[in-house]
Image (spheres, rainbow, N blue to C red):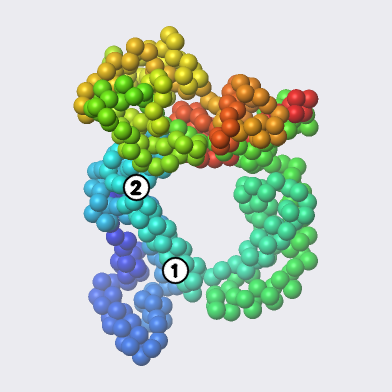
Amino acid sequence: MAAGRETVRRLGELLVEKGALRHEQIGMLLDEQRAVTAAGVHSRIGEIAVRRGWSEADRVAGALRAQAAEEIDQADAGQMLVSMGILTAGELEVARRRCARTAETIGEAIIELGLATPEKVRVAATLAMVRTSNAIRRITTSSFCPYNVMELIVGEETSAAIRHDGLCACSQCWSNVVALALNALPARYVSDLVRLPDYYRRFREEFGELVRERVAAALSHVRSNPKASCLSRFSAEILAGREADAEVFEVTVRVLGRHAHLDRATLERLFGRRAALTVLKELDQPGEFAANETVAIEGPKGSIERIRIVGPLRDRSQVEISGTDQFTLGTTAPVRESGSLEGTPAILLKGPSGETMLPHGLIRALRHIHMPPADADRVGVTDGARVCVRLTGDRATIAEGVIVRVSAGSALEMHIDSDEANAAGVPVESVGQILIPRRLA
């Protein structure tokens, strides 16, 4: 759907578009709907059209699904901000293009671009969730879209079987078991959702044993043939056939966009004497925050605006970019640990009150894991250790040489840049797996 559309088409419009009704019939249907509503009977336009013989039920069901799809398509923070008059369609398109480059959510991109405040984005995201829920509820409670009760029964039995047998409980494995079991069972659809609990009890009693049998068979198949997207699978190709020799420890993986760390002198050159960073949002690492303040950076061939400053202030200034950003700037930034700046390129920083040339400080951050001492003891690593981490995106990737930073007061979290995230197909936040050979665990 084109960005910027602010309204979901009414069911009558969709039925006319599909040739299921004529324009003049819509008015008559609305008149009848108002009349029966006044008499205390709730009827929907589609139901009245079918009852009159003006449209077929399958065409009404199709129009309802199309209407729900339109509403869900518009139900994100960006579209809601357009509907609220806070963003223009053009600004939303700019934010979407940024999302494609940085793996940020649309809300994060809008905040980073300074198009709306975090509070307005939060309100829009809440409204978007309400809209999505209403759209799904409307389609699932429609008498034109019956519900398969077996889905409820199979879902419950699958969860119980996974807990009992110890199979991976990730959403991918759960969905695979459910899909295989449902394919091997008869469907039992209910159109009267008021009576759904009665049908559920009846079909559970009638098919319970058969469902458990089919779920057990599906579970066995998934255990033997896990999908690549399974969140706890690491295949023979990944671990050279030595799965039994590795311990797996989960870690939150967070994608960091380009950002800057400043010292006091640099901050004052860019923002004026006695300037101070103000908090946009707290970060998961204790004491760190994304600041409202941003700077521009300029290289030999180009510049990048609105580089977010991460606080608090540090002893030395540095700018962290992705590999793709190098092409924009026309320079080469080495992969370094934070603070290891010797021999790194110079970079020009521009702020609202001035500019300054850092003689060195432009890097691509080495992927790393922040780890408190208790977690380091549990995993069996020390500060400075290098580990392998499986990034569990839709293109699962093993990240080698990930450095461990052990420090008191830190939170367990792995940081990668947007290029690494795009290569592995991981979202802004995901769950990775630290792989430790048992002989070292």
Q: Amino acid at mark 2?
A: Pro
Q: Amino acid at mark 1?
A: Arg
Whole-percent x, y for residue 4 in the image: 27, 50
Give the image quarter of residue 347: top left
What residue is at 27 percent from the left and 29 percent from the top?
274
Mark 1 residue element: helix
**10 and 385: which is toward the camera:** 385
* Mark 1 residue crowding within 10 angstroms, few (<14) / some (14–19) / many (20+): some
- Residue at mark 1: 138
Q: CA distance from mark 2 to mark 1?
A: 30 Å
Whole-percent x, y for residue 172 in the image: 62, 47
What residue is at 35 percent from the left and 19 percent from the top?
327
What residue is at 31 percent from the left and 79 percent from the top?
29
**349 and 201: which is toward the camera:** 349
Q: Residue furthest left?
A: 353
- Residue at mark 2: 118
**320 and 94: which is toward the camera:** 320
Q: Which mark is residue 200?
A: none
Give the image quarter of residue 247: top right
